[in-house]
Structure formats: C-alpha cells, structure tokens
Image (spheres, coloured by chain):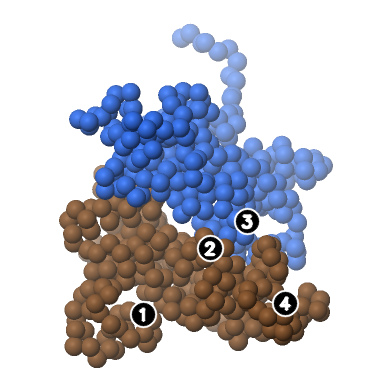
Chain colours: A brown, B blue
Amino acid sequence: MLVFTLRRLSLFIFTMLLLTLVSFSVNFLFPGDSIINLTGAINATPNQLIGLNEAYQTNRNIFWQYIAYLGHIINGEFGLSMASQSDIATEVVKMLPATIELSLVALLIAMLIGIPLGFIAAIKHGKFTDSLILSVSMFGYSIPVFWLGLLAILTFSINLGWFPSAGQISLLFEIKLVTGIQFIDILLSDSPYKWQAFSDATAHIILPACVIALAPATIFIRLARTSMIEVLGTSYIRAASAKGLSFRQIIFRHAIRNALIQIIRHVGLQFANLVTIAMVTEVIFSWPGIGRWLIESIYQRDYTAIESGLLVLSCFIFIVHILTDFIYAALNPLARGNKYGA
Amino acid sequence: MARDKIYLEEIFPSPFMQLWQVFRKTPVAMLGGSCFVFLIVLAIFGPILAPYSPIEGQLDMLLLPPAWNNDGNVSYLLGTDELGRDMLSRLMYGTSLTFGLSFIVVIISLIIGVVIGSLSALTTGLKSSFLNHFLDVVLSIPSLLLAIIIVAILGPGIANTVWAVVLVLIPQFIHITRYAVKEESRKDYVLASKLDGASPFRILYYSIFPNITDRIMGQATLAQSAAILDIATLGFLGLGAQIPLPEWGATLANGLDLFYIAPWTVYLPGLAILFAVVATNLVGEGIRHALKVRKDR
C-alpha cells in the first residue's frame, strides 16, 4: 500500500504541476498584458502595477515567473475577476460547493439506477431483458444533455408543475452560508422553517440531478453488465453453485461484491464526465455553481476568472480521481501492484 | 458429384472484409449504417437540396408550425422560426455543419493520432513513459471540458470549435493506436517479418496496420458521436457556431426564447442531433460486435 500511495502521490504532484503550468501559460495566450490577465487588475495605478510586477517577478526569466505564480496559487491568491473586480478565491469558495453538491447527488442517482440495471442485464444475459436494457442505455448516452434538460423543464416544471425550474432554493428562505453545501447549511441553521427549506431544496435539486445522472447511469449499466458477466463466468462462482448455494445466495453474497469492485475503479473517470455534463446543466437550470460561473466568464472574456476557474475545476476532478483510486486499492488487494508470484 | 472448383483455393479475406461480412449480417448495424450514409449524403448535397435559404426569412411566414399541424403550410414542411426561416432548410444546412464538420474533425484527428500513436509505439524508455503519464492526464479530462477550455483560449467561433474538438480527440487516437500496435507487435506474424529483415516502418505499414484498422474504426465512431455532441453543445452555449449559422445546437439555442410558443424550433434540432448520434453509435456497436465475433471464432 505504501508503494501504491507514493506512486499515486507522484502522479498527483506531476499532474498538479502540469495543470498549473497550463493555466500559467494560458495567460500568455490570452490577448492583453499577461500580468493583468494573471491578476485581473485592470484599473491598477502605475504604482500598483509596479508592485504586481514585483510580486510576480516579471523582470526575471520565465522559470522564476512560474515559481512566483505557484507561490501565489498555493497561498490561494487567484487575483481579481476582470468583470466584477471581486476576489476570485472567495467567489470560487462560494460556487464550488454548489457544484460538488449537485454532482454528488447526480452520481448517487446514476449509481443507484445504473448498477442494479446492469446487474439485471448481466443475469439475463442474451435474453430480451438484456437487449432492452442495452438499447435503452444507448439512447440514454446519445441524448444531448441540454435538450434533455429543456424537455425536463417543459414536462415537469411547466406542464406538470411538480418541480421548480431554476435555482438552488426558493429566495424566501434565508440560509446562512457555512459550508456552502446547501443541505448541511440548512440542517445547521436555527431557522424555524428548517424543514420547509429542506424540502424546497430537495425539490430544486431533483430535476437537474436526474438530467445529469442519465448519461453516467447508462455508462454504469454497461460497466456493471460487463463486470457481472465476467464474475459470473469465474470458477469461484461455479464452485459456489457446485456447493449447492441457491442462485440468490450466489448473486448477493459472492457475485455482487466482486462485480462492484470493478465498477468503483471507473467511478473517477465517470465523475469527470459527470462534472462536464453538470456545467452545461447548471447553465440551463440557473444553478449557482462553478460551471455556470465559468461559462459566463467565457462570455465576458474574463480571463483571470477563466484561468483560475479551469484550474480549480480540473484540480477538483483530479482529486476525486485519485480518491477513487485509493478506495479501489483499499477494497481490492490485487490493485495495489505487488503481485507475488505473478 | 459435380465439382465446381477443381482447385481448392483458400480465400483469406482481409480483416477489413471480415469485419464487413459480419457487419452486413447484423440488421441493426446495417440500419445504423444506412442512416449514417444518408447523413453523409445530406451533409454533402444538403445545401443543393434545401428548398429555401437557411438565413433569409419570409416575414409573412413567422412561426409557422410543422405541416401536420392544422395551421401548418405544406410548402414549409417542418415549419418556420421567429424570423420566418424554413426549419427544414436550416436543418439540412445544419447537417453539413454539425455532422459534416464532426466527420471531417474525426478524420483529421484520426490521421494525426494514428501517426503519433504508431511512432510512439516504436519508442521505449523515458520518452514513452512521459507520454504515458501525459496521456493519462489528458484522457482523464472529459472531452467537452477540454473543448470548452480550448475555445475559452481561442475565443468563440465555429472554426475555433473545430480546432478545439480536433485537439481533444487526438489523444484518444494516440492511445488506442499505441496500445493496438504494441499488442500486435508481440504476435508471431510480426516476429516472422522481423526475422525476414523488414524495417520497422515496413512492418508497421504492411503487417500491423491492416490488422488494427477495425479497432481504429471502432474508436472513430466513438469519437464521432462525441464530436457531434461537443460541437452541438458548444453551439448551444454560444461558444461554437455564431448567430446566423444553422448549426443544430445553435438553432436549438435560438429557439429557446420561444420554446413555449413554438416548441418545434427546439424539438426538431434536438431530434436531429439525437438521430445523428444514435446512427453513429449503432455503427459503432456493429463494428464492436463484429470484432467480438471475429475474436471468438
């Protein structure tokens, strides 16, 4: 496990360096002065500019400039937004939890729906149920997410009126921002309307989360199906059925556990996919998350915000990636790399 | 007993022909394949076949519903949008933008990716390990996110979208080519031609490439469906095709304000995207199925 951890950590550091290098070099690709792109100080006086140039060491060579940039990033100084002149770090701290909340709920829905369906398809492998589930899943990942979001709003918000169509919570409720994750904040608040707020927030999250969850769910169906078919073909399952265990016992005690391990391995990669879908969905459902903020900064040509937003978002995706790798390695000794006698 | 053939001639179809023979016998794959061919034809000839201009509107024909509706007009089969532009013509022109461009994008990135991938498969050591790490990082970023990043750097526009999607798809082709070439070079037939004294490039060209075309084609269909969705999504977000262009995603975004009055301006482009992606995915499924059948044989 130690070797595995060290190897993952080196990959993590390598990737983080690469990502900061990319976001650093992006500043030179954007039009305009790189120091202003970097700090967002469009209204800076000449004296302030001298100070900024000194802080980012622009008179020294590119390597030292990068080191100075890294120092600022590690201290959490992302500069000011060019459009609103507000501090980007505080904006990100406000926006990122909303995205995390939405994508985690979507991931949960995707897994809860996708994995059992995939298992059912694998158990009925080659029969009608299998091909039905497979063809439905193919439609699922072919639907453009923005179209699905619009159809969902039209059907469930406008025609049926079941769920609200936009936002994170009704403006009537005043929830103090503590962790940024709405549900935890509601539970922490001492408002007398706590439970109304809670149910309102739930109603707001269901529709976007389901829209986001559809495509990943279909991929989970495929992953679950393949890994279950593989597990059902192994000799330990044959041994279990030779021992006289019932089909139900084999599936629930032996097959599901081993099939799940293979799926957990792919959760990280799927999560990255899911966050991208979430960015588009946030635009449609006016969800106050980092995806919508990022796309709006692209419209406004807010280079500082684009650069920092991308850095934060890709770091977030990569951290989740590494975390799922660790969970997978913790659950599956085979993945830790030291295969004796292999 | 009559013997039609005196000499027993054994025919070994090339891997590509073997693929086609299985593909031909799968009805669903053939359905997808014919839809795919239809879309390609439409992408090429759409601008000639379209009854009206996609940009000029008829001001007396605003927001006409499709022809099957009671208020519809049969000369505007799929209705018109808020500027009186014929939806059918817009969708036909859009085929060459969304579908045709995504096809070109896939071809370009396929060529670049296969060249880099097969060259990198020949290298070993530090360079190869660095490339591996680098590819791992790039491939863990989803294609749409990467495309949005590149468009953010280059600025909005259809040309920039195309370049962004090309750049995004290249690593996938590098990865699959590299992997496939490495896997094939371990096989005996490659060793045989190596013992015959063939140079690495000769082996690559005459021995390995014919055996990995099918796998690369399978990847190409995946890339194509991703490319269609990426181009349409960027168009929808206003980062891709700009206002008058009838790109499907942009057309859909254009109908957004009138969604509740004229839902067909949103339904139809969405259905077009869905149709194109499903057709592509069916072809992909067919290829993967054929590969599996060949492997099992």
- Name the residue type under label 2: Gln
Crowding around mark 4 (Cα neighbors within 10 Å: few <14, some 14 to 19, many 20+) is some
* The one of A305 and B278 positioned closer to us in this rendering: A305
Q: CA distance from mark 1 to mark 4?
A: 33 Å
* Element carrying mark 3: helix
**Mark 2 or mark 1: which comes first in sequence?**
1
Q: Position of residue A93 (x, y in %)?
A: 47, 80
Taking A236 as reference, is B100 left or right? right
Give me the disc on residue B130: none
As drawn, the residue found furthest toward the top would be B2
- Residue position for label 4: A66
Quadrant, the C terminus of chain A = bottom right
Which mark is drawn over residue A181? 1
The answer to whether tags 2 and 3 share a subunit is no
* Disc 2 packing (10 Å; few <14; some 14–19; many ≥20): few
Q: Residue furthest bottom?
A: A190
Which residue is pictured at 32% across the width and 68% down the height?
Answer: A167
Distance from the alpha carbon under mark 4 to that under mark 3: 22 Å
Task: Compare residues A342 and A181 and report the one nearer the observer.
Answer: A181
Q: Residue A263 is drawn in which quadrant?
A: bottom left
Mark 3: few, some, or many residues within 10 Å (few <14, many ≥20)? some
Is A121 located above or below residue B203 in the figure?
below
Q: Which residue is mark 3?
A: B154
* Nearer mark to the viewer, of 2 and 3: 2
Q: Which residue is mark 2?
A: A300
> Does B3 sit above or below residue A161?
above
Judging from the image, what secondary structure is the residue with disc 4 in? helix
Split into 4 quadrants, where in the image is the N terminus of chain A? bottom right
